[in-house]
Amino acid sequence: MAPSILVVEDDEAIASGLARVLDAQGYVVARVGRGRAALESAADPGLALVVLDLGLPDIDGIDVCRRLRAARPELRILILTARDEELDVVAGLDAGADDYLVKPFRLSELLARVRAHLRSVTAVEPEEHPPLRAGDVVVDRGARRAWRRDDELALRPKEFDLLALLVAHSGRVVTRERIMGEVWDTDWMGSTKTLDTHVLTLRQKLGPPEPITTLRGVGYRFDAP
Ligand code: CA
């Protein structure tokens, strides 16, 4: 599901132009011309970003911005303002806007800003890579950090990938072939000394009690302590 964008703009020509270019980029776009309708639409949990014109006919755009921010702390708000109203920019940012564009602006500039904001929304989206937990070990794949009890583990990249794979399949055997394929991106089994070395250092970093069980000739199993 593409991110959802709400365009709040009472100028029909600008609004339809914005909706058209955003739609062409594959975003799901909704469009309203009033502040009140914007506040109602913001209740939609799928909404990720609002392009908000500050000059609206019913409610002051700054006020709409403040209320959107209060209702949806994670929402991205990009305000549009006229060239001679630059004080509005300051007021809008104070009211919780993330970014602004001064009219007239290039559509390519708007698209670049939208893309950047939605990328950062995606980056912190908790559903994208929920932290893995097995016993007292936590692996955060989004941040590439791992902990045992409250101690953060200083892992090299392949050690991290190995731990994440084992923890994701906690209690089940992960074969050497699979590890080589997923962590080292190779199915070359001529020598897996590298794997053995990484398991050894990973065990040292995890410390006791030993959570990784070796199934000789087969693979490894992470047993949540
Ligand atoms: Ca307007």
Image: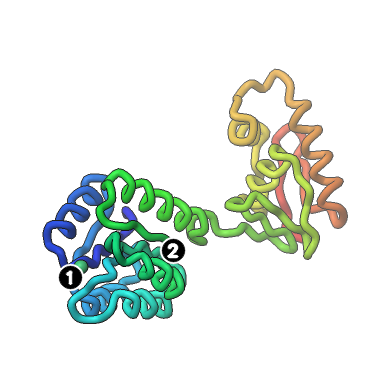
Percent coordinates x, y for residue 221 in the rendering: 71, 47
Percent coordinates x, y for residue 18 in the rendering: 21, 54
The numbered mark, 1 or 2, whose residue comes first in the sequence reads 1
Q: Which residue is mark 2?
A: 98
Q: Residues within 10 Å of mark 2 (few under 14, many from 20)?
A: some
Q: Residue at x 76, y 28 (%)?
A: 194
Percent coordinates x, y for residue 222 in the rendering: 71, 50
Q: Residues within 10 Å of mark 1 (few under 14, many from 20)?
A: some
- 53 is higher (above) or lower (below) than 164: below
At mark 1, the secondary structure is loop
Percent coordinates x, y for residue 124 in the rendering: 52, 58
- The outermost residue toward the top is 190
Q: Which mark identifies residue 197?
A: none
The quarter of the image holding the N terminus is: bottom left
Q: Which quarter holds ligand 1? A: bottom left
Q: Quadrant of residue 208?
A: bottom right
91 left or right of 206?
Answer: left
Q: Quadrant of residue 58?
A: bottom left
- The outermost residue toward the left is 12
Q: Which residue is mark 1?
A: 33
218 left or right of 168?
Answer: right
10 or 125: which is nearer to us?
A: 10
Can see residue 47?
Answer: no
- Residue type for callout 1: Gly
Q: Residue at x 77, y 48 (%)?
A: 212
Q: Quadrant of residue 218?
A: top right
C-alpha separation, residue under disc 1 versus residue under disc 2: 21 Å
25 left or right of 202?
Answer: left
